[in-house]
């Protein structure tokens, strides 16, 4: 049967066959026409048919001009778009995952030919390599976000990451430090420098970078406002990633290994989204905070002008920033002196969340205190809170009624 209602290709003087397809209207009101050129009439007309079929199915077609590859677009996304929302360390991690799992097989594939089956193959390869589901999920989220923006900008007509099931991750049970251990840790911390650093982590659930990034004032604004009794979690201390200073010619994979490396060191980064929050300071902690500030002021005066003017709440003896590695070593030392089994530093944040929920604080309030973006993250602490409540009820029952449980 003869082909109908499709553009007919015409042979040009250059020996190629040419077809013109109208796919919409430009902003100036003129028709948006795409020129197709192929060696044969059949190839030109098949390409025109394919373009019109895509327009019919999706309501859009990709931009005219040279087509981007998967790597072209992901490099653009990681170089110019992601840094506006993510800190350098996060972008570095994203780039590493793309380089390891996407670029080798699919980096040179045209972006508009990237399919759900390609994503399935990526996640299957990661699983076979022993990568955790959470690792696979992170790759999926990076790709989904990048493809969302590619869709908005007309580089693709669909986000193929939305057409596959995201790798499933079983919610991990979050562990809180037992109350007895918490008291032992805080008792040892009372004898250490920056005592309040550990108290505020247990009381307010601050992340390490948020605690070390606290400053008394920034640009004339009180950040730790002891008069109002509020901590504004607006900054965090992060490690700056080393970058290649050679333009990528040294052949080393990581910027930290480059002979001409640049960057490095510590920097203050603004907290964003739900992480940017203001939290009331427990009244019981205010005297300790005030004593801590006075001690800092005395150290500054005794320094003889050698004080590092960072205005951080928790600092070394010369006012310099506390390196997160040193902070972790201090935590390990406190645990050892307190006779507490080794736990990750983040357990203080878990403990804060669990204790708040066990006290009956509304889960959305706990979400705000901790700065969780997703309420499901906060819900992960409910099991530990239930265990604490069960133990409390058991103690109350014994106090009121005596005897063994179930008697």
Image (spheres, rainbow, N blue to C red):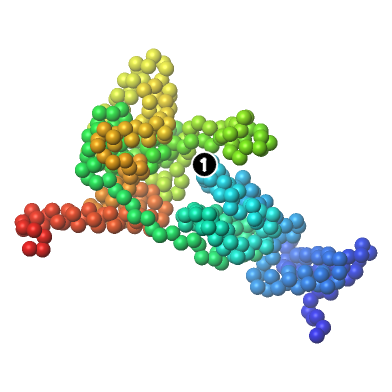
Label 1 neighbourhood size at 10 Å, few (<14), some (14-19), many (20+)?
A: some
Picture residue at 49% right of the left edge, 57% below the top? 137
Decide: is 242 above or below 91. Answer: above
- Secondary structure under tag 1 reads helix
Q: Quadrant of residue 207?
A: top left
Query: x and y percent of residue 238 in the render?
Result: 46, 37
- Judge whether 52 appears above or below 389 on screen: below
Position in image of residue 349 (x %, y %): 33, 45
Q: Residue furthest left?
A: 402
Residue at 57% x, 63% y is: 120
Question: Quadrant of residue 262 in the image?
Answer: top right
Q: Which residue is mark 1?
A: 89
The residue located at (30%, 27%) in the rendering is: 193
Q: Going by the image, does 195 lie left or right of 306?
A: left
Q: For the view shown, which residue lies furthest in the right direction?
A: 13
Closer-to-camera residue (361/142): 142
* Residue 319 image position (x, y, % from top left): 39, 24
Q: Residue at x 86, y 71 (%)?
A: 41
Image quadrant of residue 220? top left
Vertical position of residue 239 compared to residue 54: above or below:
above
């Amino acid at each position: 049967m003869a082909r109908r209602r499709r553009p007919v290709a015409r042979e040009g003087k250059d020996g190629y066959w040419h077809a013109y397809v109208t796919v919409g209207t430009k902003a100036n009101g003129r028709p948006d026409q795409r020129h197709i050129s192929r060696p044969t009439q059949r190839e030109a007309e098949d390409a025109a048919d394919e373009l019109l079929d895509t327009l019919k199915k999706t309501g859009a077609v990709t931009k005219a001009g040279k087509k981007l590859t998967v790597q072209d677009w992901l490099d653009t996304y990681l170089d110019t778009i992601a840094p506006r929302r993510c800190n350098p360390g996060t972008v570095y991690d994203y780039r590493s995952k793309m380089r390891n799992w996407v670029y080798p097989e699919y980096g040179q594939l045209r972006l508009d030919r990237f399919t759900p089956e390609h994503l399935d193959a990526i996640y299957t390869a990661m699983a076979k390599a022993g990568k955790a589901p959470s690792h696979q999920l992170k790759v999926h989220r990076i790709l989904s976000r990048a493809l969302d923006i590619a869709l908005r900008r007309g580089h693709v007509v669909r986000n193929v990451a939305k057409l596959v099931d995201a790798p499933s991750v079983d919610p991990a049970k979050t562990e809180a430090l037992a109350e007895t251990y918490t008291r032992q840790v805080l008792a040892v911390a009372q004898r250490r420098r920056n005592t309040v650093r550990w108290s505020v982590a247990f009381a307010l659930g601050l992340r390490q970078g948020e605690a070390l990034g606290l400053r008394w004032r920034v640009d004339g604004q009180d950040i730790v406002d002891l008069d109002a009794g509020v901590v504004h979690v607006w900054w965090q201390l992060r490690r700056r990633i080393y970058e290649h200073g050679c333009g990528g010619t040294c052949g080393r994979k990581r910027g930290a290994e480059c002979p001409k490396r640049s960057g490095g060191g510590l920097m203050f980064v603004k907290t964003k989204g739900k992480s940017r929050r203001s939290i009331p300071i427990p009244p019981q902690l205010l005297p300790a905070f005030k004593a801590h500030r006075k001690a800092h002021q005395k150290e500054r005066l005794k320094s003889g002008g050698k004080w590092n003017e960072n205005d951080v709440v928790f600092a070394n003896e010369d006012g310099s920033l506390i390196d997160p590695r040193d902070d972790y070593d201090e935590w390990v030392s406190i645990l050892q002196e307190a006779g507490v089994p080794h736990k990750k530093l983040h357990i203080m944040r878990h403990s804060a969340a669990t204790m708040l929920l066990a006290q009956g604080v509304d889960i959305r309030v706990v979400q705000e205190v901790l700065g969780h973006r997703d309420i499901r993250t906060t819900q992960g602490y409910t099991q530990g809170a239930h265990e604490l409540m069960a133990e409390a009820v058991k103690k109350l029952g014994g106090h009121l009624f005596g005897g063994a449980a179930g008697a």
